[in-house]
Amino acid sequence: GSKEFAAALGPGIVHKRTRPYRPQTNGKVERFNRTLAAEWAYAHTYPSDEARSVTYQAWLHHYNHHRPHTGIGGQSPIDRVGVHNVPGNYS
């Protein structure tokens, strides 16, 4: 429920909603979705959706821990935040 979500955000983090069907107000998520499609979902030919799904956790780890992001000066998100003990469960 929403209480669990709020607790997962942590101190000082505010959940902001965007207007539905307005990608202009949701640019970061739209950019992530574009990167997700280009670098993971359609970057390789997979024999099945299940085979593609198996690779998601590794891709997401690479994206957050190792991939340089131009919007944050070539750092990875984990380096940017300075937190390296984040649990490995992204689901």
Image: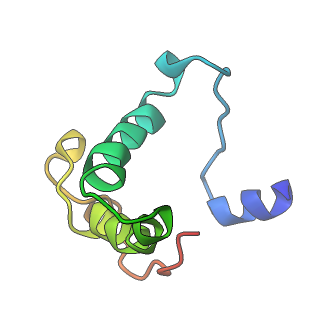
Residue 24 is at least partly visible in this image? yes
Colouring style: rainbow
Residue 60, horizontal then vertical, whole percent: 38, 65
Residue 28, horizontal then vertical, whole percent: 42, 35
Residue pictured at 42% horizontal, 41% vertical: 33
Q: Is 69 situated above or below 51?
A: above
- Front-lying residue, 37 or 76: 37
Residue 63, horizontal then vertical, whole percent: 30, 61
Q: Is 53 situated above or below 74?
A: below
Residue 19, horizontal then vertical, whole percent: 66, 20
Residue pictured at 44% horizontal, 74% vertical: 54
Residue pictured at 24% horizontal, 52% vertical: 43
Tally of numbered discs: 0
Quarter of the image with the C terminus in it? bottom right
Residue pictured at 35% horizontal, 37% vertical: 34
Residue 82 is at least partly visible in this image? no
Q: Is residue 69 left or right of residue 49?
A: left
Q: Quadrant of residue 14?
A: top right
Furthest residue to the front? 47
Quarter of the image with the N terminus in it? bottom right
Q: Quadrant of residue 55?
A: bottom left
Q: Is residue 2 left or right of residue 24?
A: right
- Front-lying residue, 18 or 47: 47
Q: Is 12 situated above or below 71?
A: below
